[in-house]
Image: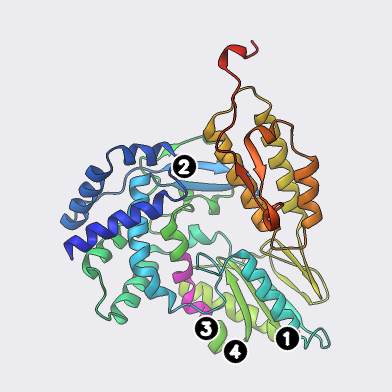
Amino acid sequence: MSDKLLVDLFQAYYDARRYKRNTMSALNFEINLEHNIFELYKEIKNGTYQISPSLAFIIFDPVQREIIASPFRNRVVHHLVFNYINPILEKLFISDSYSCRQGKDISYGVKRVAHFVRSSSQNYRTDNYILKLDISGYFMSINQKILYDKVENYLLRHNTNYPFDLKLILALLKKIVFHDYIKDCVIRGGHTNWQKLPRNKSLFFTPPGFGLPIGNLTSQLFSNVYLNDFDHYIKRNLKFKYYGRYVDDLIIIDGSKESLQIAMAKIAEYLSANLNLKIHPRKIYLQPYTKDVNFLGGIIKPYRVYVRHRTKASFYRSVAKSNNILKNIDVEKKALRKILSSFNSYLGSLGQYKTYNLRRKILDNKLSPAFSRYYRLGSGKFRYKKIILKRYFKLIPSSTKHD
């Protein structure tokens, strides 16, 4: 078991660095890779592993949100735990829970809901209604004890000779779930960035024993675990066939408006009594399927799905920001990779919809001339679906910089 844990820690490291390799935290860890992995191994085995201070900051695009980012060392442990328990928990989730699951991302969720609308209305021939709900301050309202008990009970109940030390992993889970992430955290950007953030969306205003940090891989998995029994309640007790959830966004399609109205009261009661959660009163949507429904960035209409305007506007802002960076004579590789990641994220999202003309317009007409110095478009079917950072590009020497 000891040797396997060490091998699994190396795998967790490779998984963690996949998208974080060029961060300072990851580079520092990699400098003394073997030493750092062996230190983690010994701490986990001896039960002395402690969670290092996190970085707290606010993002504003597409909406204002608090991020509590763990240092790379903690991320390795998150991936270790995730790799062990996710395959077990995955078997317990309903098919139509879309977050943090292989092959079930945002675009999958939008396509499933579009399918629900078409199927439940018999190809748009019968009346149907869409109920969309949002949980208020979801991550900050999660009861840590309820969450940990759920994970522990699932693992103990389904113990089938796991290929890992269950006692050891439960000890790590306890530390991750109950850790006070705002204690000793480093704040980036200044306290003023928090001024307009609602208190139910910040760990700094969450009572002891509640809340999970947005930004951790384990938090994404735990968000599915916490609502898993609720998902089964919707399907088995309330008997709704057409139901889907992405984190705290819930959607139900049914032929009876009255049934959905009755269900709202039952859902609110269940969430409050069992999970300490509340439905956001200003984010309740109940309309016929013929009206536009906004779900996970897609505008679902009969026969077609469009990308919402906010996503397009956000991409345009990202292009303008990137053009402003690229007009500088010398651009750091870190900034170039950040632009690459941002563009390909938007192009990947837009590529799930009928947006070929939009993507072509932006990539052909909205980029600064300096863009071609560092990037090229994908070829063939990927031409307007991704950009590629050139391996060799000429940076103008520092001596030619303007004062």
| Residue at the spot 38% in from the left edge and 38% down from the top edge | 27
**Amino acid bearing label 3:** Tyr
Q: Is residue 363 above or below residue 399?
A: below
Q: Which of marks 2 and 3 is nearer the N terminus?
A: 2
Asked which secondary structure carries label 2, the reply is strand
Camera-near label (1 vs 2) is 1
| Residue at the spot 49% in from the left edge and 57% down from the top edge | 140
Q: Which of marks 2 and 4 is nearer the N terminus?
A: 2
| Residue at the spot 33% in from the left edge and 57% down from the top edge | 11
Q: Does the magenta stretch include residue 268?
A: no
Work out whether residue 188 or residue 276 is closer to the camera in this orientation and state it. 188
For the residues marked 2 and 4, what is the alpha-carbon distance in whole angstroms? 41 Å
Residue 105 lies left or right of residue 46; in this view the side is right
**Magenta-drawn segment:** 223-232
Q: In this view, does 67 lie above or below 3?
A: above
Residue occupied by mark 4: 239
Residue occupied by mark 1: 120
